Amino acid sequence: MSHKLRASADSNLNSSISDSNNNRNTDDDDNIFPIPTIYRFRAPIASLDCMEEFQSTQEQLCMQLPQQPCSKEQLLLQGLSTPASVTRQSSTVTPGLRYRNLGKSGLRVSNVGLGTWVTFGNNVSEETADCVVHAAYECGINVFDLSEAHCGVRAELQLGHILQRKAWKRSSYIVTTKIYWNSKSDERGLSRKHIIESVKASLTRLQLSYIDIVLVHRADPMCPTEEVVRAMNHVINQGWVMYWGTAKWTPVEVMEAYTNCRQFNCITPILEQTEYHMFCREKTELYMPELYNKIGVGMMGWSPLAMGLVSGKMDDGGLPIIARSSLNKNKYNQSFSWTEDETQSSNKEERLQPEDNRRQQEKLREVKEIADRLGCSVVQLSIAWCLKNDSVQCLLLGAADVDQLFHAIHSLQLVPKLNTNTMNELERVLENKPCRPPMVSTLALR
C-alpha cells in the first residue's frame, strides 16, 4: 500500500511540474521570472600561511607525543654510551620544533638549524662533532649550514664523512654551503669560473650528488650581477645545486639580483642569510619582511647570541670582546661578528668603550633578571626572542658539544611563554627597536 501511495505522489509531483512549465510558456514575457540556477563550487584553497604548523611528511605527522630531548644522563640510564646511539622514533618529536617553507619555495626546513662553524672548530674533536650532528638530526633538525669562510674546507670534509657513515636518507636533511670570496686570495671574485669550480669542489668534499642550497657569501662589487645569476642558474640546471641564495647582502643587492634573474629568465634566490640578535635588528625587522612579500626571499638567521656577547664571553678585564665590524655605522653591516677581511687581520678584535660597555652590561643584567623570572638562561631567552619573529624561518644554532645543543634546543619551549607583556618589557630594556626614517620630500631639499 505504501508503494502505491509513493507512486501516486511522484506522479502528482511530475504533473504539477509539467503544468507549471506549460503555464510559464504561455504567459507573457513580462511576467516571466526565471528560476535561479544553483551552481556547485568547490571550497577555496586554504592559504599556505595557515599550513606552517603542519608537518610535511608522513613520519612527521605521526609525531604526536612530544618528549624532552634526552640528556646525557638519561642516555646513560638507558644503557647508551654516547648520544650517537640514539635512534629516531616516529612517536617522539622535540617540543616546539616546526617545519616551515623557506621563502616562497616548497623546501621545508626546521625552524632551527645547526650552524657548524662552532661544531667543526679547531677545539672540537671529530667524535664530539659526530655526536652533535647525530643528536641534532635525532631531535628533528634537518638543516646543516657550512661556511668555507669560517671553518675552511675542513667543515665540508668532516660533514661529508659523517653523512657517509650515518647513511641517512638523502631527502631527510638539507645541506647549505657558501661560495666564499676574499680580496686577498688568488681565487677572488664571483666570476662564473670561480662559482662553478667552488661548487664542484664542495660536492667532492661533501661526497654528495647535489647540494641543497648554495649561498653567495657577500656580493662582489667587481663582478656584474648578471654573471653571478647566470652562473647560479647554470649550476642548478646541471643538477649540482637545488636552490641558491645570498648571505650578508644588502636589500638593494638582493633586489638587483632578483631583477636580473627576471630579466634573463634565471632561477631566483630563495633566501638571505643574515645576522640577527637582540643588538642587531634593523635589516631583519624592517627590510626582510618587505623582500619576502615582494619577491619571495626568505630569511635564515645566524648568531642569535651575538657571537658570545649574550653568553658572557669576556676577556681578562671583564669586557665583552666585540669584533671591529660592530663599530661600523653602516646600517646594513652593523655586526657583532667578523667579516672575511677581518679574520685575516692581526687586530681583528676591538673592545667597546667603557661607557658603551657599562650600558651593555646594564642591559644584559636586566635581561638576565627577566630570564630568571621565566626560569631559563639568558642564552635560551635570546634564542626564543629571535624565534618569536615570524620573519625568521630558520635560526642557526651553534654547539661545541651535545650539552650546548640540548641547552639551546630547550629554548623552543620558551617561545610560547613570551607573551606581549614580556616582549614589551624586553623592548623597554633594549631600547633599540628599529624604525624607518621619516620620508623627506624632494621639494623640501631644494
Image (cartoon, rainbow, N blue to C red):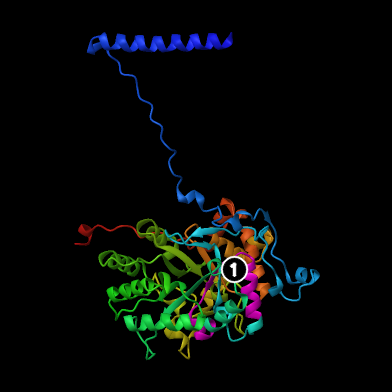
Position above or below: 410 against 209: above
* Residue holding disc 1: 364
- Who is closer to the viewer here, 6 or 62? 6
Q: Quadrant of the C terminus?
A: bottom left
Residue drawn at x 37%, y 70% as measured from the top left: 250
In magenta segment, residue 110 = no
Tell me where the magenta segment starts and ends, as one range.
128-155
Residue drawn at x 61%, y 61% as measured from the top left: 412
Residue 272 image offset from top left, x and y in percent: 42, 68
Residue 61 in view here? yes
Amino acid on which the number 1 mark rests in the picture: Leu
In magenta segment, residue 139 = yes
* Total labels drawn: 1
Side (left or right) of 78 relative to 305: right
Residue 199 image offset from top left, x and y in percent: 42, 80
Position above or below: 42 against 12: below
- Quarter of the figure with residue 327: bottom left
Residue 392 image offset from top left, x and y in percent: 49, 62
Side (left or right) of 135 relative to 159: right
As helix, strand or loop, the secondary structure at mark 1 comes to: helix
